[in-house]
């Protein structure tokens, strides 16, 4: 047997790194085209650290955990004709296991690829599950319709009878409050405003706002624009599609590939012109930085990934954000209970919001700990996952209620939904707090 057929399951059998030297690529998942996960899989030495970090495994005894979803499924597959186990659909794609693994096994990449194969092979394109997941994964299409008639959509989707029908027919939990559509999308505001108010050849950022900030929380997107213009940046808002995060999580790899190709295409041109890419959602920055280069090889993918930042991170790296906030006037704000999204944690950004906001006179931010909110994008919207999602979120809810704060703070829109749902608190985005502190909220002209 070759090395490829006999992985060093036991570290005592040999050094996994050595086996890479005479590495003979194996096509594990044919649908993944040129994807080859062997080097990462063989680095697994079965310590189970990933399993202890998995919020789904913690509350669901039937979920086998990330070690099984990643390296073990891969090994089984390599040894024979083994189908991907259906439990991969229970992985929420929180990516906490990625950060926990001491051996850099590309767990979420394995899960995303395996999930896509499972959906292709085992989920009927005619089934309700497939269409429910496709609708959730392609929220942007639904949101476009919703934004065309926001008042009507909000009334219909907020109706308890409609919610109950949604659960019975589609399996979308009736317990969840459907997100409210804004009267004016961010992109309409941007167009009406006439685009960028600041021009600069040196300081230029391209904003990846994603679907949610465009259709549901345009105030977050406006805050980003105003804060970056305050620091002298020319902001570009190119055409874009969903980052693909909900598509990866639902095994819709073809949809994700199309969206990623479009996004890389538009942002690549701007990066070539000297723009950096900034995101207001930590899952979007995660997708552009990590998931795209792990899963795709479009021209410019690596360049876009290397130029992408979460927005507050960007200001801390390239501007004196701390100094600007130290000089800000007192802020009239309630104290804030901060939840770090799992995808912020993965990018090493989990401590920054509290550090930044705590500089302001008149506001305290309390970190409510390192638990997962439990909603994980579309995961907690599925009726079959609702109870698990709330069980995972219980620790965060309790810590929010124990904290000396009345309002939540986070950078992820679906974590914000779960925080509101579990505690009844209003939730703000860190950029909104910064915009208020720098007094840029009113803009420079009416409507701007
Ligand atoms: S944490 Fe990494 S090395 Fe340990 S079992 Fe999980 S995948 Fe393997
Ligand atoms: S991505 Fe999250 S839910 Fe999925 S296996 Fe890893 S830790 Fe568990």
Image: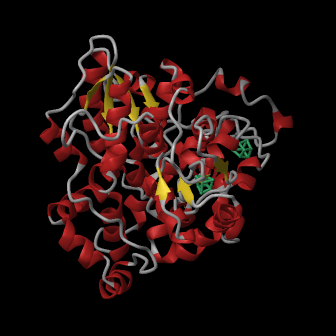
**Residue 169 placement, left or right of 23:** left
58 versus 193 height, above or below:
below
Q: Position of residue 98 (x, y in %)?
A: 62, 42
Quarter residue 399 falls in: bottom right
Asked which colour scheme the image uses, the reply is: secondary structure
- Judging depth in this view, the residue of 163 and 228 nearest the camera is 228
Residue lying at the far top of the rendered structure: 202
In the image, 56: left or right of 151? right
Q: Is residue 293 above or below residue 157?
A: above
State ligand 1's quadrant: top right
The N terminus sits in image quarter:
top right
**Above or below, comparing residue 139 to residue 221 in the picture:** below
Q: 393 or 9, which is in the foreground?
A: 393
* Residue at x 40% of width, y 73% of height: 177
Res 285 → quadrant: top left
> Residue 411 location in percent, x, y?
49, 47
Residue 63: percent from left, percent from top: 64, 66
Q: Is residue 209 in view from this perspective?
A: no
In this picture, is 81 found above or below 343? below
Q: Examine the image and state in which quarter residue 297 appears.
A: top left
Residue 146 vs residue 403, the one in the foreground: 403
The mark total stands at: 0
Residue for point 66% across, 34% down: 104
Q: Quadrant of the C terminus?
A: top left
Image position, residue 301 (x, y; %): 37, 27
As drawn, the residue found furthest toward the right would be: 12
The residue at 57%/39% (across/down) is 357
Can residue 127 be seen?
A: yes
């Amino acid at each position: 047997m070759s090395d490829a057929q006999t992985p060093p399951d036991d570290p005592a059998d040999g050094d996994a790194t050595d086996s890479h030297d005479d590495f003979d690529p194996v096509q594990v998942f044919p649908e993944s085209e040129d994807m080859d996960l062997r080097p990462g899989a063989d680095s697994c030495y079965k310590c189970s650290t990933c399993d202890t970090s998995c919020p789904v495994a913690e509350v669901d005894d039937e979920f086998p955990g990330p070690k099984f979803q990643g390296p073990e499924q891969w090994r089984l597959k390599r040894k024979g004709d083994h189908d991907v186990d259906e439990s991969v659909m229970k992985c929420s794609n929180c990516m906490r296991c990625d950060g926990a693994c001491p051996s850099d096994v590309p767990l979420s990449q394995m899960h995303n690829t395996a999930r896509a194969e499972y959906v292709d092979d085992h989920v009927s394109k005619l089934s309700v599950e497939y269409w429910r997941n496709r609708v959730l994964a392609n929220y942007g299409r639904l949101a476009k319709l919703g934004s065309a008639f926001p008042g009507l959509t909000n009334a219909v989707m907020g109706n308890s009878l409609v919610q109950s029908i949604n659960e019975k027919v589609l399996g979308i939990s009736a317990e969840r409050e459907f997100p409210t559509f804004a009267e004016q999308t961010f992109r309409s505001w941007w167009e009406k405003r006439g685009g960028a108010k600041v021009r600069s050849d040196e300081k230029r950022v391209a904003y990846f706002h994603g679907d949610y900030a465009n259709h549901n929380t345009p105030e977050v997107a406006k805050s980003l624009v105003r804060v970056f213009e305050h620091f002298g940046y020319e902001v570009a808002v190119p055409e874009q599609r969903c980052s693909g995060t909900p598509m990866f999580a639902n095994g819709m790899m073809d949809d994700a590939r199309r969206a990623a190709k479009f996004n890389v295409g538009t942002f690549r041109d701007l990066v070539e012109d000297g723009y950096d890419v900034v995101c207001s959602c930590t899952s979007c920055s995660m997708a552009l930085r990590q998931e795209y280069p792990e899963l795709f090889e479009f021209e410019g993918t690596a360049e876009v990934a290397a130029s992408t930042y979460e927005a507050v991170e960007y200001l801390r790296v390239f501007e004196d954000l701390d100094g600007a906030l130290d000089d800000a006037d007192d802020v009239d704000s309630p104290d804030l209970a901060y939840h770090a999204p799992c995808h912020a944690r993965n990018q090493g950004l989990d401590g920054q919001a509290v550090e930044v906001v705590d500089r302001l006179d008149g506001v305290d931010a309390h970190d409510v700990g390192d638990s997962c909110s439990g909603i994980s994008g579309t995961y907690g919207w599925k009726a079959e996952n609702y109870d698990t999602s709330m069980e995972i979120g219980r620790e965060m809810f309790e810590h929010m209620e124990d904290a000396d704060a009345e309002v939540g703070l986070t950078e992820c829109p679906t974590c914000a939904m779960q925080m509101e749902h579990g505690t009844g608190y209003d939730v703000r985005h860190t950029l909104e707090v910064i915009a208020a502190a720098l007094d840029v909220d009113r803009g420079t002209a009416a409507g701007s």
